[in-house]
Structure formats: C-alpha cells, structure tokens
Amino acid sequence: MPELPEVETVARGLQAVLPGRRILLVRLGLTDFIEDPAALERNLPGAHIESIRRYGKFLLLRLRPGGAEAKELSMQIHLGMTGRLVVCSAEAPIPPHTHVFISLDDGRELRYTDPRRFGCMRLLEGEARDAVLRAVGLDPLGITEAQFREALQCRRARIKALLLDQHVLGGMGNIYTDESLWRARIHPARLAAKLSEEEIHRLFLAVRGVLREAIALRGSSISDFVGPYGSPGEFQRRHRVYGREGLKCFRCESRIRRVVVAGRGSWFCPRCQRAPRNYSVAGGTGRAATAAER
Ligand SMILES: [Zn+2]
C-alpha cells in the first residue's frame, strides 16, 4: 500500500506537468473501483486541471469545470495496492490493466493502471471536498513538535496504532511507522500517553527524517510501486527493520523480531526498543507477513 512518500512522489511528479492542461476526453475500461463512472465521463471533458496534491495517503486533483455555472470539482484518487497514475504520450504502448484514459490538450494522456483494482476514484463536487479533507489527520511533514505531541499524548492507545490512524496523522502506514519507531528506539506497543518528552521529541524527528529521506528517494518499491514516470523508488534499501525478521539490528546486532501490534505485523529490535512492562509478546508469530502487510 503506497504511503505518504510514495503518494507524495506521484503528486510532485504530476504537479510538474498537469496544471493548466485541459481535459478533452475520458475513456474508461473496468470501472468497479470508480464511484459513479458516468460522472467522470460527463464532468471531466472541458475541465482545466488546477493542481494535484497529496492529502494523507490519497491524491486530489482540483479542476476548474468548463461551464461557467458548474460547481467546483475535485477528483479523489486512492492508489490502493497496485494503482499507478502516469502521464505519457497518447501513442505510448498501453500496459495491461489500464482502466482510465484522460486525454489532455497537449496530446498526452493521464492513465490509471491497477492490476488488483483495490484503488478507488471518485469525483467530489463543491463542499463534498471540504468534508473529505477535514477527515484527514495532521500532515506529519507540516506540523510542529507541539502539535505532534498533543495529537499523540491525549489518546490512550499504543503508539503504533496512533501513528497508523489516518484521523490522527495522515499518510503513515506500516513501513514508515516501523522505521520511525526503530529510529526513535520506541517499542510499537508502548502507550503513547506514557512516552517521555524526550521520546516524543526523538519520534517527531524520526518520523520527519524517515519521510523526508523516503521522498528524496522516491519512496519504497516493495510491491509494484513506481513513480509517475515509471521509475521505482529506492527507499526500500534503507529499511532498517521493516520485513527484516531474524536479521541483525543495524545498531546493536540483536535479531530483529516481529510481533502483531494494532493488528499489523510490526518489526522491531528487542534490545533498542524495550517492550512496555507487563507486555506479553504472545501476539508475535513466526508467520511470514501477508501481502497486505507488506
Ligand atoms: Zn538494536
């Protein structure tokens, strides 16, 4: 599942080429991941693209409709597990599983390809967009340490669960959560409210550091993720705990372990990241991570 750095990579790539373009035509293949496909075909042609930005883990394409009296329009796009949004020449070969073709006025096409179709696409009219944006948590790259502390410490939950909660922080998923907690030397099952000031400070820096480095490397390509021009990300080479069960910790050489916290496979170093008192690791299993967790 693409997380903040992967979606940000796509957003930045598309933001460099899409604004100002006018949509000429929409062609759809399979549409089971689109809410109201007819609305796309009806409303997109003639609209101008104003911007494309990331919110949490999804993309929002803002459009200025063709008709003067038409309402403001946005298209919300979740890439799901395997979604790809690419701009290319209309003559470029069409990869299998391409289901959305949006023709642009410069002869190029915005194409959406998604083999597993766990993604989702929908058009938001007028105020519907504001409601969607209000539900997204704070952006980890745009907040202060004080906001970060307040968001985490007022809730009684394990730190891993809070970091993953999209209403608390928008954009963090399993990879960057585990990497941040390892970097900050905090066990995923710790209660957020019991973290010390120093630990929160370390975690704040770790989250931002991990996300910024991952964006600089265009995200992690562990399944099918590729950026908007088809180039894979490289941050997976910097993973320190994620998916490394049984391998040595980069800091202390202890063996990385995996437990289930907040319903998710969680990798950590048992020495660098001390478990909370009375915490049983019975939830840990030796099973390999499922595709959904990776
Ligand atoms: Zn360690």
Image (spheres, rainbow, N blue to C red):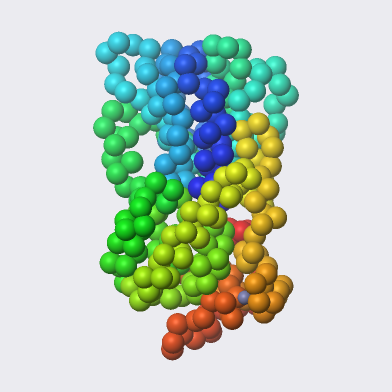
Residue 160 falls in image quadrant: bottom left
Residue drawn 58% across the image and 12% down it: 106
Q: Nearer the viewer, residue 120 or 154?
A: 154
Q: Is residue 89 left or right of residue 204?
A: right
Quadrant of the rendering where the C terminus is positioned: bottom right
Q: Is residue 82 left or right of residue 73?
A: right
Task: Please state the horizontal and vertical placement of residue 159, each as a whole percent of the image.
Answer: 42, 69
Residue drawn 66% across the image and 77% down it: 252
Residue drawn 54% across the image and 48% down it: 212
Total labels drawn:
0
Q: Indicate whether 96 appears above or below 27.
A: below
Residue 256 visible in this rendered orientation of the protein: no
Task: Please state the horizontal and vertical placement of residue 284, each as a whole percent of the image.
Answer: 57, 78
Residue drawn 52% across the image and 35% down it: 11
Task: Please state the horizontal and vertical placement of residue 241, each as a whole percent of the image.
Answer: 63, 67
Residue 15 visible in this rendered orientation of the protein: yes
Query: If the picture is divided into quarters, which one holds ligand 1?
Result: bottom right
Q: Nearer the viewer, residue 41 or 7?
A: 7
Q: Indicate whether 71 appears above or below 243.
A: above
Task: Please state the horizontal and vertical placement of residue 277, each as a whole percent of the image.
Answer: 44, 87
Q: Indicate whether 81 appears above or below 239.
A: above
